Every structure is written in structure tokens, then in C-alpha cells.
Amino acid sequence: MKHLLLPALFLLITGPLVGELRAQQSGADSLRQTYALLFERLKPDLQHTGLKLRFDAALQFPISRDIRIPEAKIMPGFGFNLGVGYGFTDYLSAYAGFISLSHSNEPVATINSEQAGFDGFHGAFRIKFNPYGRNQYYTELGVGIFELVDQQSDGFSGSGFSLTTGTERFLTREFTMGFSVQYRFSRFDQRIRQGTAEQINRSVHADMVMFSFTFIYTMPDEKTDRTL
């Protein structure tokens, strides 16, 4: 009988304390849930996730010395980028697209035209720093394959990767307009002559800086119920 007395006494003393701790924990969980719901309700109702359509109007400047000497003397160029993308979360999205820019050029043996086209296919991942305001800030990391050719399709081809930083503003729930600056590291390791590509001994450095006005439309989905 004595060996049951101590456990019973322990339960009698600690029982109310345990009940009070459980009540406090339940109250804390309820408070956290209330704050979380309130935060969701106060967030701007913006469409981050889903299918995206993208258009960029771009101005591109050659940086590398290789494309500013008679190898291929390229001037600043104007053009556009068309792309599609997908928003996975509020913070992360991906894009793929086609870029085409027209550069003034001093005709040389390799690019025998006053206009040279910089074209290519590319993809990029975008990370947003603070997706919960109408003004957004982001960075992108991309890769692609590119050509720099004249009107006879003679010139160079190669690949590269890019780093981009930019800002955009939600004008509506689904539509954003923004501005970005991109540095593209490009290396052309093939020369194209009369439609035939041949490997060259030394890659042509074709780094570019591009300034873009960007327009993105994200397909709408059903609005989330954010009532408390």
C-alpha cells in the first residue's frame, strides 16, 4: 500500500501544473496560427505562381575587346526577348526564351554587313528577395546558346551564361513591368561560313551588358480565401 502512496501523491501535486502547461502551449499555438492568418490576409493579393508570358525590350552594349576590333567590330544594338516561364513559389521562378538583337557593324571579312544579328535561346532561374510588396527585387542566373552573324548568316556561334539584377512593380494582380541590367559572359568557339560551322583555335570573347524593360503576365488562378 505504501508503494502506491508516493506515485499518487506525485500525480496529485503535478497534475494541475501539467494541465496549466498544456493550456499555455495550446494558447501559444493558437496565437501563432492567428498571427500567421493575419499575415496572410495583410499580404498584397499578387499572382506569383503559375504560367508566365514575358517580353523584354533591350539595349545591348559589347564589352569584350574581341568584338570591338576588326575580328568583328560590333556597335550597341537594339532588340527584344520573348519567353515563357513558370512560378514555382513566391520566391522562385524559371524562364526560357528567344532573344534577337540587331547591332550596327563595320563590315569585315568575317561579318561582311553593316548589320549583325545577335540571336539565341536561353533559360534562367529567378529568385525574388521580398515577394510580398508591389515593388519586387530579384536576381537571375541563366545559360544559353548564341550566334553573332551577318545577313548572309556568316559569323560566329557559341554559348554563355548571364547574371541579371532587376526590379519590377505589380501594376495589377497578374501584370508586372520592370527594369533589369544583365552581364552576359559569351564565348564563340565556332566560325560560320556559307552555312558551315568550323572550330576556331581561340574563342572569341563576346561579353555584353544589356539593359531591358521587362513585361510579365502571370496566368491567374482561383483567388485564395484569406478570411480569418
Image (cartoon, grey):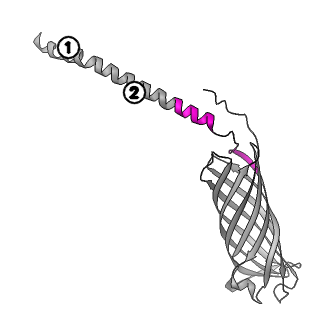
Q: In this view, does 153 lie to the left or right of 139?
A: right
State the residue at coordinates (74%, 85%): 68
Residue 42 placement: quadrant: top right
Between circles 1 and 2, the one closer to the viewer is 2
Farthest residue toward the left? 2
Where residue 67 sits in the image (x, y, percent)? Answer: 74, 83
Which numbered disc covers residue 25?
A: 2
Q: In this view, does 4 lie to the left or right of 217?
A: left
Q: In this view, does 24 lie to the left or right of 166?
A: left
**Type of amino acid at the residue the image marks with label 1:** Ala
Where residue 175 sits in the image (x, y, percent)? Answer: 77, 47
> What's drawn in magenta, residue-wise?
34-52
Give whichever of 223, 7 is nearer the camera: 223
Residue 181 placement: quadrant: bottom right
State the residue at coordinates (67%, 54%): 94
Disc 1 packing (10 Å; few <14; some 14–19; many ≥20)? few
The quarter in which the N terminus is drawn is top left
The quarter in which the C terminus is drawn is top right
Give whichever of 228, 18 is nearer the camera: 228
How far, Cα to Cα, is label 1 from label 2?
A: 25 Å
Residue 24 placement: quadrant: top left
Give whichever of 134, 114 is nearer the camera: 134
State the residue at coordinates (20%, 18%): 10
Write down the residue under mark 1. Answer: 8
